[in-house]
Amino acid sequence: MKKSLIIGLLVIVVLISGCTSTTTVRPAEPTPGATTPARTSTEQQINIRDSNFVPNIAEVPIGTTVIWINDDNVQHTVTSVSGLFDSGSIGSGRTYTYKFNQAGTFEYSCTNHPNMPHGKVVVTG
Ligand SMILES: [Cu+2]
């Protein structure tokens, strides 16, 4: 009689522990909308293609992050004429980003290829 009681208790303990083990901690799921935070600032893409900045003149609102993408098979640079920014050499398929926090016209060139047409970013306040 006592043996069956002990076995019964063991069964209960196993059942309880079995139940509690199902309440494992779930990995935190991202809340909807939290995957793209701070997407308030705008972005402008400029491709470097066939040794040209495309678009050659980009007009953007203040606070815009400009992303240059080198689509060529040679290295280019995005170098501000006024010295405000300089990407250094951008390899093929690589990018360079710069955020424009002031209004104005910002001309830039490629120091690797002085004959490349200069590009311009026109930042409007
Ligand atoms: Cu170049």
Image (cartoon, helix red, strand yellow):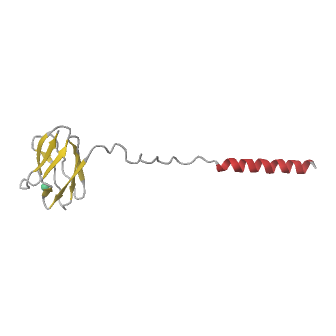
Q: Position of residue 91 (x, y in %)?
A: 22, 56
Q: Position of residue 93 (x, y in %)?
A: 24, 58
> Which residue is pictured at 22% across the width and 58% down the height?
92
**Picture quarter with ligand 1:** bottom left
Name the one closer to the observer, 9 or 62: 62
Looking at this view, name the residue that lies furthest to the right.
1
Looking at this view, name the residue that lies furthest to the left.
115
Q: The C terminus appears in which quarter of the rendering? A: top left
Name the one closer to the observer, 19 or 76: 19
Circle count? 0
> Which residue is pictured at 26% across the width and 46% down the height?
42
> Which residue is pictured at 18% across the width and 51% down the height?
89
Q: Is residue 107 left or right of residue 90?
A: left
Name the one closer to the observer, 7 or 63: 63
Q: Quadrant of residue 94?
A: bottom left
Q: Position of residue 6 (x, y in %)?
A: 86, 48
